Each structure stands twice: as C-alpha cells, then as structure tokens.
C-alpha cells in the first residue's frame, strides 16, 4: 500500500509484518512468555473513558509542550528500541531524521545498530536527544559512555531497570541471530551467543547487580537529569524520587520482560497520588510507555499526570515499511489524532488537560 493509505498506527504494523524478514519481525513484535502484559498494555486504555466538555472555544489548539525542559511539538517521544538495522539499512538514523523534521525527541538506545555518534551526528543543531543506558557489569564502560553522551549534548539519562535478566521472548528465541555484529553492539557485549535469538545475543553484558545505591554514583559522574526506566509500582517511583532522580518511566518494556507486570497506564494515577502524598511530585517528571497507539491514549496518559509518553514498536514498523517518510507520516497521524481529541474534549493547551477529564472507575476491571 501507498503511504497515503496509512490511516493509523496499526496500519504500519500490518505492512511491516509483510515486508520484514522473519527474524526482524520476531524480534520487534515479540513479548515475554504468553504476551499477556504486551496485549494488556494497549487493552488497558480501553477501560478508560473520556469526559468531554463542550461549548469551549477550541479554534486554536496547541499540542506543544516541554519534556525535561526541552520543547517538543507533542507530548510524545520516540523511545529506545535496539537493533534498528534489522528493519531498515540505515537503522536509528531514520528515526533521528524524522524526529528532526517534526520537532520530536528521540531516546537513543545503548544497543543501537548505528554507533552512538552516528545517531548524534544525524541530528540538527538544537535537536533534543536522550540516552537510554543499559548498565554494564564493567562500570568503566558505562562511565565512559555516560560522560561521552553528556559531552555530545544528551538532555537526559534513562537507566533501564527492568532487565537484570532478559525476558523469554519465545518467537525471537526460535530464530537464530544471524546479523553481523554492528560496531556499537560488539563494543558493549562481552559475548555473543547466536543460538538464542537477537535479544539474548546482544544483552549478556547487562549488570544484574544494579541497585538503588548506584544512583548516587551516576549523579556523581553526570549533570544530565537521571530517570529510571522500567518502574512498575508506585513504591519504586517514590524510591526513585527519594534517591534524587528527576523522573521515571513507568514501563514494562513493551511486555518483553516480566509477563503479568501491570500496564503503565493502569498504575499511573496511583503513582501520581503516592508521589504527592510524600511531597515528591514537584520537579519530578513521570513518563509512561507501552501500548500507546492512538491520540486518545496520549490524552489519557497526560490527563492522569504523565508529562509525556514513549512509543516504541509503531515507529519501528513505520521505519521498516517506509523509512523516514513513514516515520514522519506516523508522527503526523499522531498529531492529527491528538489535536482532534483535544478539540473534542474541549481543551486547547496541554496544561489544561486534567484528571477529571477521564473516568478510571473501571481501570482495575481486567
Ligand atoms: C525495546 N525496548 C527497549 N528498552 C530499553 O530500555 N532498551 C532497549 O534496548 C530496548 N529495546 C527494545 C527493542 C524492541 C524491538 C522493542 C519493541 C522494545 C522497550 C521500549 O523502550 C519500550 O519500553 C516499549 O517498546 C514500549 O512499548 P511499545 O510502544 O512498543 O508498545
């Protein structure tokens, strides 16, 4: 199909499935075990209903906002997903170019197919990028990487905490990882086991001893704001704030780690309440990712307190199917959907999106 026949994020998934090689499709689309959390991530949004207000002047709607102090055209960012070259020969740089053209923030993964510097070099002056960090068992490797990232202008450090051991993504494991090691991955990995799918082949260096005490050390080596990615309970969001983090990403890693971890949208309201109760909600930014596929999903997350949302697979699919133009088109679709929802909800600015605009009485009704 032509790009102008794409009407929503799901359309890109359908096309990607038909054009991706089986190992790439398996790696991108898989979730852990029975994929219950993966499906729940999007399904949970179906239990939240909207409370639209009418007779408001919504002639001019402005969906732009700031995230960690940087401007963005929408309260969404392209989250970190490894191995971009499985889907497109140019890899993550495709996402960088599309993000630039639509004023969107990109989170660069530790396990990118392109080198970190290639991805930064592809950005325009002033374009905001963040770094996702998998912490290496050899802390010197991580320290060097973090210092370098800061010197290259990264505006946030997102430490992934939900992967001390890799989840079992059986679709992926059934495939043998055959790609040549891209440079960056070879630099980070201590060993490459090609027998157990792409994820296991590249992730053996991740340190399972990472713990809260390490946050102080990261704070001592960088001035970047530090956020923990992969928070799955309000208690841990509170701990992140108490350890001096600037924020968290509520995430179950797209359902690829612990199956039966809750969806981030389900725990968002209670997380905001817990932070408020402890007086930790000031200058602390809460993001969520997982299963965000519609403008209304973004609206619900903002209403319940998120500063922004991360979106993963849909951008991989758009990139794989149509390259830079595909990712730009998907961003345009998200913009149109989100602005339409704002207008039909009777709000014109992000700051005016409030908890009373959503009905979460059935959020626990699985
Ligand atoms: C991921 N994710 C991820 N997270 C991370 O911190 N480091 C990583 O290297 C990766 N790699 C990765 C690869 C692929 C193929 C996927 C699908 C996901 C998780 C990612 O950042 C995010 O949490 C989810 O993708 C969000 O869910 P959706 O939008 O994909 O449903």
Image (cartoon, rainbow, N blue to C red):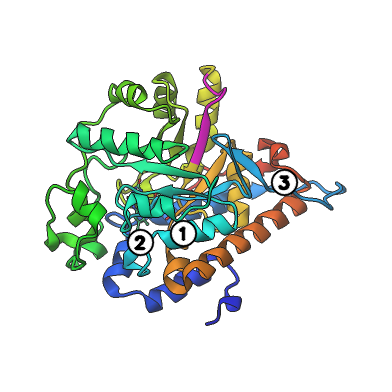
Vertical relation: 248 (above or below) 56:
above
Q: Quadrant of residue 213?
A: top left
Vertical relation: 355 (above or below) 183:
above
For the residues labelled 1 and 2, the Cα–Cα distance comes to 9 Å
Name the residue carrying label 3: 51
Name the residue carrying label 1: 95
Inspect this view and state whether residue 322 appears.
yes
For the residues labelled 2 and 3, the Cα–Cα distance comes to 39 Å
Ligand 1 within 8 Å of disc 3? The answer is: no
Residue 71 covered by magenta stretch = no
Whether tag 1 and tag 2 are in contact, CB under 8 A, the answer is yes
Residue occupying the point 54% across, 17% down: 279
Q: Quadrant of residue 119?
A: bottom left
Range covered by the magenta-colored residues = 280-287
Majority secondary structure in the magenta region: loop
Residue occupying the point 69% across, 40% down: 353
Q: Position of residue 155 (x, y in %)?
A: 47, 37
For the residues labelled 1 and 3, the Cα–Cα distance comes to 34 Å
Q: How many marks?
A: 3
Name the residue carrying label 2: 84
Depth check, front residue: 121 or 343:
121
Q: Residue furthest top?
A: 279
Q: Position of residue 95 (x, y in %)?
A: 46, 59
Inspect this view and state whether residue 168 appears.
no
């Amino acid at each position: 199909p032509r790009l102008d026949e794409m009407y929503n994020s799901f359309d890109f998934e359908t096309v990607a499935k038909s054009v991706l090689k089986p190992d790439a499709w398996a790696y991108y689309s898989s979730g852990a075990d029975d994929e219950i959390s993966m499906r729940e991530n999007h399904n949970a949004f179906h239990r939240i209903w909207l409370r639209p207000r009418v007779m408001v002047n919504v002639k001019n709607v402005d969906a732009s906002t700031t995230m960690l102090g940087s401007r963005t055209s929408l309260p969404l960012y392209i989250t970190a997903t490894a191995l971009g070259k499985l889907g497109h020969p140019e890899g993550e740089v495709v996402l960088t170019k599309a993000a630039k053209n639509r004023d969107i923030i990109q989170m660069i993964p530790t396990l990118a197919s392109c080198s970190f510097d290639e991805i930064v070099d592809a950005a325009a002056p002033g374009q905001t990028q963040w770094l996702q960090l998998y912490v290496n068992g050899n802390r010197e490797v991580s320290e060097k990487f973090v210092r370098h990232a800061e010197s290259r202008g990264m505006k946030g450090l997102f430490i992934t905490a939900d992967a001390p051991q890799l989840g079992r993504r059986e679709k992926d494991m059934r495939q043998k990882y055959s790609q040549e090691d891209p440079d960056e991955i070879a630099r980070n990995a201590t060993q490459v086991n090609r027998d157990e799918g792409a994820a296991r082949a590249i992730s053996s260096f991740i340190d399972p001893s990472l713990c809260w005490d390490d946050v102080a050390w990261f704070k001592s080596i960088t001035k970047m704001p530090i956020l923990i990615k992969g928070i799955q309970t309000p208690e841990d969001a509170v701990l992140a704030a108490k350890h001096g983090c600037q924020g968290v990403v509520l995430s179950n890693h797209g359902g690829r780690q612990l199956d039966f971890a809750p969806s981030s949208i389900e725990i968002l309201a209670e997380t905001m309440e817990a932070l408020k109760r402890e007086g930790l909600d000031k200058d602390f930014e809460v993001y969520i990712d997982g299963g965000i596929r519609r403008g209304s999903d973004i609206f619900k997350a903002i209403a319940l307190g998120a500063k922004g949302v991360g979106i993963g697979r849909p951008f991989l699919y758009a990139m794989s199917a149509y390259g830079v133009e595909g990712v730009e088109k998907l961003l345009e679709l998200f913009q149109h959907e989100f602005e339409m929802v704002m207008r039909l909800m009777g709000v014109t600015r992000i700051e005016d999106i409030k908890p009373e605009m959503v009905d979460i009485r059935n959020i626990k009704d699985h």
